[in-house]
Image (spheres, rainbow, N blue to C red):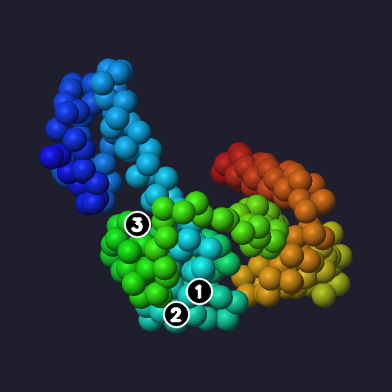
Amino acid sequence: MIYTPQLNTRISDGIRPSAKYAMTNKRSVPRGQYVAVRLRDRNDGRYAAHYKSYRRILMNLYEQIKNQLTPKHVTERYGTSIHRGDMICCPFHDDKTPSMKLYDDHFYCFGCQKSGDVINLAAQLLGLTNYEAAKRLLADFGICNDSAAPAIRHPVAYEQTRQFHKDEQECYLALLGYLKLLELWEQKYSPTSQIATPDPRFIEACQMKSYVEYLCDIFITGSTKERFTAIRELKPYLDELRSYTAQKNMEEKAIDRNKRIHADLVI
């Protein structure tokens, strides 16, 4: 018998591996995974069917775990502190302040941009492969392993989907870019005297900075309802805000470049 790495699955000796179909060794493939190179030989159809059957069982196992557990359950179980707004210190990089957000069906780190589901998070926290982490979750949470049966994926609300996370990230990054521009204007165009006429850009910075900071705080520590409301209000104006910020940043670069040229001419 030929056994696939890390799997309780065997292949009949009647299926002869050929140059077109190679089982990779452990050095070239991470633990718990193997690569099947597509065979053109008709005699190898039995292995292809066997591989599809195993993959279906494995996917059903993953779906059962994801339907019953959330990243928050895993984080609490394995001893990671959860801060306000369901934020934790990211285990994927050296995180000093909480930058990873836990959602109902996935996680996302605003620092290193890592994202994934509950199994990926458990694998990282425990230092295991995804398959080993799935087996560990089955044992620790007492989930019945009925992976042979088709898994039923329950519908989730918009607030629990990846599209919600994508919209949230787009709004946050657009606000962050505008906030940096306002901070530049506040510092660069601050009046030099009390009788000087304030620059319109300085006035805009004073009027908008606090509100933009408030919106950024909502996307970091706000509740799901608050973030949903902010996305609904900002989404129609997102492209306009990006264009406005990009245009003003280009103008600032042009002003700085002209100042440097003028200074060189004077010298």
Asked if residue 97 is positioned above or below residue 52 in the image, the reply reads below
Type of amino acid at the residue the image marks with label 1: Lys
Q: Residues within 10 Å of mark 2 (few under 14, many from 20)?
A: few
User: Along the polypeptide, which appears first: circle 3 or circle 2?
Assistant: 2
Residue 34 x, y percent position in the rendering: 26, 41
The residues tagged by marks 3 and 1 sit, at their Cα atoms, a distance apart of 17 Å
Q: Residue 255 in the image: state x and y as whole percent.
A: 69, 45
Q: Please give the name of the residue rendered at 13% of the width and 40% of the height, measured from the top-left corner.
A: 1
Q: Can residue 97 be seen in this view?
A: no
Is 246 placed left or right of 2 in the picture? right
Point out residue 191 in the picture as x, y percentages from the top left corner: 77, 68
Residue 83 position, x and y percent, is 52, 81
User: What is the quadrant of the C terminus in the image?
Assistant: top right
Look at the numbered discs 1 and 2 and tell me whether their residues touch, using CB distance below 8 Å. yes
The numbered disc on residue 76 is 2
Rendered view: 101 above or below 33:
below
- Per the image, the residue denoted by label 3 is 130
- The residues tagged by marks 3 and 2 sit, at their Cα atoms, a distance apart of 19 Å
* Residue that badge 1 annotates: 72
Q: How far apart are marks 1 and 2 (CA)?
A: 6 Å
Along the line of sight, the residue nearer the viewer: 189 or 9: 9
Q: Which of 194 and 47 is in front in this view?
A: 47
Q: Amino acid under label 3?
A: Asn
Looking at the image, which residue sits at the far top?
41
Camera-side residue of 24 and 242: 24
Q: What element carries label 2?
A: helix
